[in-house]
Amino acid sequence: MDSLHDIWQSVMAILSEQLTPTAINTWFADCAPVALEERRIVLQTTSDFKRNIILQRFGDTIRKAMSDLFSCEFDLLVLTADELEDYHQDEPDDTLPEAAAYTFDRFIVGQSNKFAHAAAIAVADNPGKVYNPLFLYGNSGLGKTHLLLAIGHSIRERDPSAKIGYVKGDEFTNQMVTSLREGTQEEFRRKYRNVDLFLVDDIQFIAGKLGVQEEFFHTFNDIYESGHQIVITSDRPPLDMVKLEDRLRTRFEGGLMADIQPPDLETRMAITHNKAQGLGLILTDEIVEYIATNITSNIRQIEGVVHRLTAYRDMLDDTISISSVRRAIKDVIRVGVYIPTPEAIVAETSRYYGIPEEDIRGQRRSKNTAMARQVAMYLIRSLTNLSLVDIGEQFENRNHSTVLSSIRKVEDLIKTDPDTAAAVRDISSNVNARNQ
């Protein structure tokens, strides 16, 4: 989960399975998440009556959903609008989310993220002394936010007095606009400029916003010149943010940049095992391999499948089988996840390599065309949920063994060839940008 919004959407998806649309609309249409504390989620609704109904009728379900998501017990606080202001006044200045799942010991390390993990550990051990700023980038759902928050929690554990600021790029924008409207600019600036550790998630959202970039530039400089640590995540490297000011780009590139690629099969299997174990779910090696083979690019989707299987076991007393896994994968993919089309992936691959789409899909065997075709197959496997047979149909009915061979070749090249790794990263970013 990358944000409070994502977490609440997952909870609502579970509620929607158990309640009618009328009940959801009646009790939750104007209910919104406010904060995620260490062991409690805070919600806001419009009246005492609705608050009481949510607590009495749905409180246990919400707590159970949160416990399933984070593998620990969660409490629930529901506020009315009148109580919200008092709650915010009592909030600590520290903005670091206290989600127990985001620690280094819960991060599965593989070839695709080994460098980024090592860099994050080094920063956590010596904040402000090495790799400042640390810039982590990669596609959504690969663990950037996990590493970002793990750094914060590691520093907090070592030094409870450390001032830590955490913000997402879009939230920084919203908070700045609010401060301008309410005349609280100085308070907004003090909130982030006086921290020992500044964690910024999804910085790409400030690109193209000149006023926001100006404010962020001065915030960055104040923190950096004070010798304090800055860690930033993005879905793409600074060079690919075409609307990012050069002075920010050079500062981001002046530290250490570490990319995170989609995990290989072995890492996906380890992640599946780890998520299942954390929920007390026993899965056979066959089922673990099936999940890891069919969900190839997004750790969140693996997590969602494991949670869904846990729900099947608990609520339906269902024996976990390949059939139930297929159903869980179908359910998770359906809940709010952007899945690009094979056509979009082939089109972006064609544009990147300068090779006609019909040649990529066809039988031409030139070296460049074959490479583009293999990358397209790999990306369709990584970014969609098509089977090997379905992918083969996109390329004049090539058989599944040919498709699998192409995918494995690209997986190997990503680890050894920077050009292939860059191509996969850039095409992925361009495909995902189509949904923004």
Image: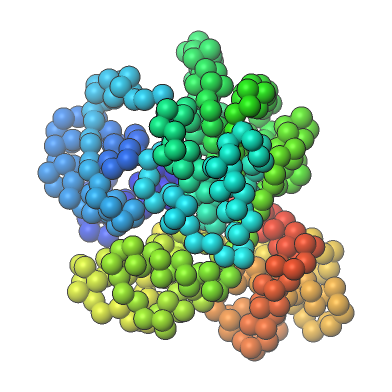
The quadrant where residue 79 appears:
top left
Residue toward you, 102 or 56: 102
- Residue 410 horizontal/vertical position (percent): 70, 73
Residue toward you, 39 or 76: 39
Left or right, residue 205 beside residue 253:
left
- Residue 233 horizontal/vertical position (percent): 60, 44
Residue at 38 percent across and 40 percent down: it is: 98
Is any atom of residue 431 visible in this view? no
| Position of 226 relative to 420 (above/below) | above
| Position of 52 relative to 71 (above/below) | above
Residue at 51 percent across and 43 percent down: it is: 151
Residue at 66 percent across and 77 percent down: it is: 407
Residue at 63 percent across and 27 percent down: it is: 227
Is any atom of residue 99 visible in this view? yes
Left or right, residue 114 beside residue 359:
left
Residue toward you, 197 or 31: 197
Picture mark count? 0
For this orientation, the residue located farthest to the top is: 183
Residue toward you, 120 or 94: 120
The quadrant where residue 55 appears:
top left
- Residue 395 horizontal/vertical position (percent): 70, 80
| Position of 277 relative to 100 (above/below) | below
Left or right, residue 409 beside residue 330:
right
- Residue 1 horizontal/vertical position (percent): 44, 51
The quadrant where residue 346 appears:
bottom right
